[in-house]
Amino acid sequence: MAENNSKQWSIAPYFIVEDVVASADFYRDKLGFNYERFWGDPPSFCMVKRSGIVIMLAEIEAKGSIRPNRLVERDGGAWDAYIWIDNADELYAEFKSKGVTIARDLCDQIYGCRDFEVDDHNGYRLCFGQGLES
C-alpha cells in the first residue's frame, strides 16, 4: 500500500493531572505554551498549545491516577511525549532561563537527534529534540 503524504497528521497527548489550572499555568509560564480556556465548573480540562503542538490536560476525581511512563517503565527511561522542534539549543536556553527543571541535559544522541528532557508540573517527562544533519 502506498503511503499518502498529501496531508499532515498531528497528535495531542492526554495527561491526567492533579490540578488542571496549576498545570496549564506551568505550561504557559515555564514552557511557553498558551491556552484559551478551561472546560468544566470547576475547571477540569484544558488544551495547551505551542507551535502547532497540543497537549490535553484533564483533572479527574480519582486522585493518585497520574502515571508518567518513567514511573512504570522498568529502567525509568520512557518519555510521555517526544516533541520535534527546530532548534534544541535555543529552546534549552529558554527553559533554563525560566528555571525549568531539566531532567537530562542537551546532547547529541546515537539515534540522530539533539535533544533534552524536562519534567512537567505533574512529573510527565517531555523530550524536546531536533534531527541532526546527515
Image (spheres, helix red, strand yellow):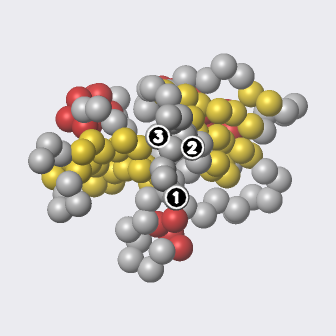
- Name, please, the residue furthest toward the top: 36
List x then y, in percent, for residue 40.
85, 33
Instruction: Compare residues 46 and 22 and report the one nearer the observer.
Output: 46
Tell me which numbered mark, 3 or 2, is placed earlier along the sequence.
3
Rendered image: mark on residue 11: 2
Q: CA distance from mark 3 to mark 2?
A: 16 Å
**Residue 106: in sight, yes or no?**
no
Which residue has dot 3 on it? 5
Q: Amino acid at mark 2?
A: Ile
Vertical side of 115 occupied by 99: above or below = above
Do labels 1 and 2 touch, CB within 8 Å?
no
Give the label, 1 or 3, closer to the camera.
Answer: 1
Rendered image: mark on residue 94: none
Tell me which numbered mark, 1 or 2, is placed earlier along the sequence.
1
Which residue shows up at 41% across the image and 44% down it?
83
Q: Is residue 64 left or right of residue 109?
A: right
Q: CA distance from mark 1 to mark 2?
A: 23 Å
Q: Amino acid at mark 1?
A: Met
Which residue shows up at 34% across the image and 36% down it?
85
Which residue shows up at 80% across the image and 30% down it?
39
- Name, please, the residue furthest toward the right: 41
**Are there few (<14), some (14-19), or many (20+) residues within 10 Å of tag 3?**
few
Which residue shows up at 53% across the image and 73% down it?
72
**Are there few (<14), some (14-19), or many (20+) residues within 10 Å of tag 1?**
few
**Residue 52: in sight, yes or no?**
yes
Q: CA distance from mark 1 to mark 3?
A: 13 Å
Q: Amino acid at mark 3?
A: Asn
List x then y, in percent, for residue 71.
50, 69
Which residue has dot 1 on it? 1
